[in-house]
Amino acid sequence: MTLAQRGRWLTWVSLILLGGVYVRALAFTPPERFQGLAQKIFYVHVPAAWSAMLAMGLVGLASILFLVMKDYRFDRFAAASAEVGTAFSLVMLTTGPIWAKPIWGTWWTWDARLTLTLFLFFLFVGYLLMRGAVTEASLRARYSAVLGICGLVLLPFIHLSVYLFRTLHPMPIVLKPSAPSLPGSMLETLLLSFGVFTLLYVGFVMQVYALASARDTVGDA
Amino acid sequence: MPEGPANGGYMVAAYIAAAVILVAYALFLHLRSRKL
């Protein structure tokens, strides 16, 4: 089985598992008392944010490895991760405002966390646009690596923005020094969703990486 | 009946939006691999 086929298989299995997460979140996880059913948006919004940040983190790490080792597989991986990260950022930026409207009374507010996550999305889009605009491979890889490292630097600011600035956005409830502050069934659903979104990220990246490898092979021939 | 405010429509909209984006991207990749 080729990498592309394995990626495709993993993607479809992950999407079926995502259906399972939906059933568990919607039918078998209790709603939060004050926020009502809108709180359940959290089970797709937070894992999508996690996947987007994982994607940018790995773009940054692969970029550093590319600059050190000059191995174009790292550049190809970074590009694949950036494309997939854009999709997850879009999920994050779509589901976030849909949650915010009933809870905050507004779709969007320019506070630190929201503005930085929007910046993350623009960084992903800018990264992809820049790769499309620069035709010379070594130059494209070097420029991309610099942008990828900028993205990696941005991640701690996004995570810590709720501590550093006055913001409407809720504090972290899982990725924090103390124990997660969620009842058991809610935490289980959230962790399951984290796992499925991570699998989906891996499946997508395998496919995009395999496509890029195939395209480079065709280009070299 | 769930407690809290009646805002289930927002929940449904968010779940549909997430599914549409992710499935559309999976289909887009599938079509791209077939074209190559």
Image (tube, coloured by chain):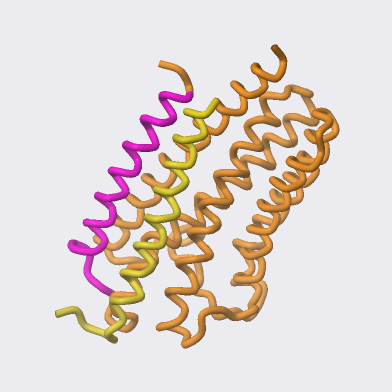
Chain colours: A orange, B yellow
Quadrant including the N terminus of chain A? top left
Q: As displayed, is residue A108 above or below residue A57? A: below
Residue under the point 66% across and 51% down: A124
Relative image position of residue A98 (x, y in whole percent): 44, 74
Relative image position of residue A104 (x, y in whole percent): 47, 85
Quadrant including the C terminus of chain A? top right
Which span is picked out in magenta? A4-31
Is residue A38 visible to us here?
A: yes
Q: Main secondary structure of the magenta part?
A: helix
* Residue A72 sits in quarter: top right
Residue under the point 67% across and 22% down: A216
**Viewer-nearest residue: A29 or B35:** B35
Residue under the point 70% across and 20% down: A219
> Farthest residue toward the left?
B1
Q: As displayed, is residue A196 above or below residue A203? A: below
Q: As displayed, is residue A102 above or below residue B26? A: below
Q: How many marks?
A: 0
* Residue B26 sits in quarter: top left
Residue A176 drawn in magenta: no
> Farthest residue toward the front?
B35
In the rendered structure, the answer to whether residue A33 lies left or right of residue A69 reads left
In the rendered structure, the answer to whether residue A100 lies left or right of residue B12 reads right
**Viewer-nearest residue: A24 or A190:** A24
* Residue B9 sits in quarter: bottom left
Relative image position of residue A171 (x, y in whole percent): 51, 71
Residue under the point 40% across and 56% down: B20
**Viewer-nearest residue: A2 or A21:** A2
In the rendered structure, the answer to whether residue A196 lies left or right of residue A162 reads left
